[in-house]
Image (spheres, rainbow, N blue to C red):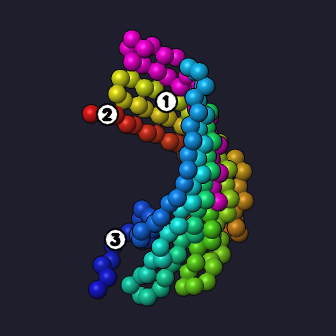
């Protein structure tokens, strides 16, 4: 007996099934002020079966990201640092497969630019960014209902600390 969840698979982490991601990343520090970061990844999702027997395989994702960071201010004695970041984020999404057939109005390619800042204080880090869809090529774009690539912007916030 399959357990039903309150959220549709499309709204769940990893679309309600296991997913597999493979990727590589590299970071290069240039002196005290500049850092560049790059990563490439491939994410594939397992097919989801609903209680009525219908199936959904959400489109695979290929991501490529590049970022440059510049240290705006640092005060080592207070363990404080402030960085400016500029990222380019490329996302290619494959078509969803519904009951074995490729679905229309799914998938496409998106390029985002994300300016932001990160503040470090002692063992804590706080980052803010504005993710802007700069170029989109979505399949049957006028019919797509998802948020990926159709939003005006995304506000990005991260917080991390060591304890």
Q: Quadrant of residue 122?
A: top left
- Lower position in the chain sequence, tag 3 or tag 2: 3
Q: Nearer the viewer, mark 1 or mark 2?
A: 2
Q: Are marks 3 and 2 in contact (CB under 8 Å)?
A: no
Q: Mark 1 and 2 residues: CB-CB less than 8 Å, in contact?
A: no
- The circle on residue 154 is none
Query: For residue 143, which quarter of the picture?
Result: bottom right
Residue 87 located left or right of residue 13:
right
**Does residue 54 appear in this view?**
yes
Q: Who comes first in sequence, dot 3 or dot 1?
A: 3
Residue that extends furthest to the bottom in the rendered view of this protein = 53
- Decide: few, some or many residues near mark 3? Use Cα within 10 Å; few <14, some 14-19, many ≥20: few
The CA span between labels 3 and 2 is 34 Å
Residue placed furthest toward the top: 77
Q: Is residue 161 magenta?
A: no
Dividing the picture into quadrants, the one containing residue 70 is top right
Tag 2 residue: 162
Q: CA distance from mark 1 to mark 2?
A: 16 Å
The residue range painted magenta reads: 70-92
* Element type at mark 2: loop
Q: Is residue 53 left or right of residue 32?
A: left
- Circle nearer the N terminus (1, 2): 1
Residue 132 location (% of width, % of height): 63, 44
Q: Nearer the viewer, residue 41 or 97?
A: 41
> Looking at the image, which is closer to me, 64 or 56?
64
- As drawn, the label of residue 118 is 1
- Prevailing SS of the magenta stretch: strand
In the rendered structure, find residue 6 and report the number of the disc placed on it. Answer: 3
In percent of width and height, residue 156 lies at 50, 42
Q: Residue at x 52, y 17 (%)?
A: 73
């Amino acid at each position: 007996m399959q357990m039903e969840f309150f959220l549709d698979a499309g709204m769940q982490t990893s679309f309600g099934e296991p997913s597999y991601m493979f990727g590589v990343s590299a970071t290069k520090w240039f002196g005290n002020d500049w850092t560049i970061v790059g990563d490439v990844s491939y994410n594939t999702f397992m097919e989801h079966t609903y209680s009525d027997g219908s199936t959904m395989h959400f489109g695979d994702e290929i991501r490529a990201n590049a970022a440059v960071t510049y240290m705006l201010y640092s005060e080592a004695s207070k363990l404080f640092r402030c960085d400016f970041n500029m990222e380019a984020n490329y996302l290619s999404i494959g078509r969803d497969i519904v009951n074995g057939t490729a679905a229309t109005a799914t998938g496409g390619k998106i390029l985002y630019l994300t300016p932001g800042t990160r503040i470090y204080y002692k063992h804590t880090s706080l980052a803010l960014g504005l993710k802007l869809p700069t170029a989109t090529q979505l399949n049957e774009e006028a019919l797509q209902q998802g948020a990926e690539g159709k939003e005006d912007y995304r506000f990005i916030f991260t917080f991390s600390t060591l304890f």
